[in-house]
Image: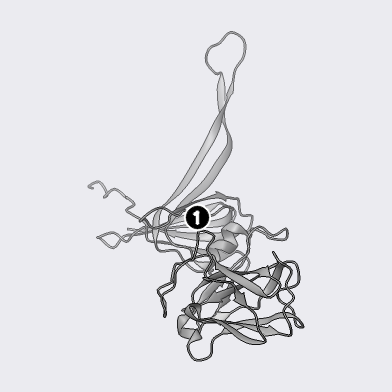
Amino acid sequence: MALSNPRSIFGIHQISPYNIDTGEFYGTMRVLGSSTLSLSSEQIDLMGGSSRYPYDSEIGPMTSEMKIVAREYPDWAFELFLGKKPTRTAASTISVVSTATNVQGTSIINATNGISSVGLIALTGDDDAKFGNYIIKAVTPTSVDVYVSTNINFDRGTDAVYEDDLLKITAAPIVIAIGTNPIPAFGLDLTGIGVSAFTVGDTASFTVDIPHKGKMDVVIGGASDIFPKFGCMVYAQKKGNGGLFQINCFNVQAAGLPIGFTEKEFSEAEISAKLLFSSAKNGVFRITALD
């Protein structure tokens, strides 16, 4: 009888984490650089007397780890690797301005003497709105300047520019009168109410979202955040002869999702996880190969 063809593993296809309790999948990652299972153990040697060599040796604790090099960031990755499930908002065909809130002091957003709300200019505002975090700052008792965190889509609708290095977008302070007070290039209206009585230096903030295909939002680092244990299926690339290779990791614990920003490169995250013993499965992982 001739020797069998050697079994080999080529490439990586995807990983699919799942809920240990229900078996349901969180989703999948397909844009991967690698997935490596590392199993190692310390050798415990019996030494004594003048011998330079051990009399005996036994296997110590096993270290079982998995490293994933990911080039995509699905919503579930933030839940499993950073401990917080994101909030998902459905696609929107319109621009949306958040409720403005005071940051320093209480005089800017004021229902009696100040700015009662921030919204879009009627008819044109939706087209001219620009994504970002905005700051309103009182420069006199009756006027404000406005700043925005990014110029990433200043070319949306009417072109816009920064006025200075502090990210100001108002060429001159806006005197807040009763009624609407527009910032035309940004599609925004500051609605004044009563006689403005700002405290100079007070600030308020709001955000603007432009139309999108879906929105993910998550705050990481809360005191009540938890890192759930999960199972994970790992698949090698299908070989030319049709061969398939799968590893089912029964009980995985991970923490950490590095998010890199590099010039003219796609972001890549190296995720480290522990492979734990599963009492229910009486093992750590199962390997299945279809030759």
- Side of 46 relative to 33 (left or right): right
Choose between 80 and 43: the one closer to the eye.
Answer: 80
Residue 147: % across, % down: 56, 67
Q: Residue at x 47, y 48 (%)?
A: 37
- Side of 33 relative to 25 (left or right): left
Residue 183: % across, % down: 53, 79
Residue 252: % across, % down: 57, 55
Amino acid type, residue under disc 1 in the picture: Ile
What is the crowding at mark 1: few (fewer than 14 residues within 10 Å), some, or many (at least 20)?
few
Secondary structure beneath label 1? loop
Q: Residue at x 49, y 91 (%)?
A: 123
Above or below residue 195? Residue 64 is above
Q: Based on the displayed image, in which of its 4 quarters is residue 76 positioned? A: bottom right
Q: Based on the displayed image, in which of its 4 quarters is residue 175 positioned? A: bottom right
Choose between 108 and 177: the one closer to the eye.
Answer: 177
Q: Which quadrant of the rendered structure holds the C terminus?
A: bottom left
Which residue is disc 1 drawn over? Answer: 259
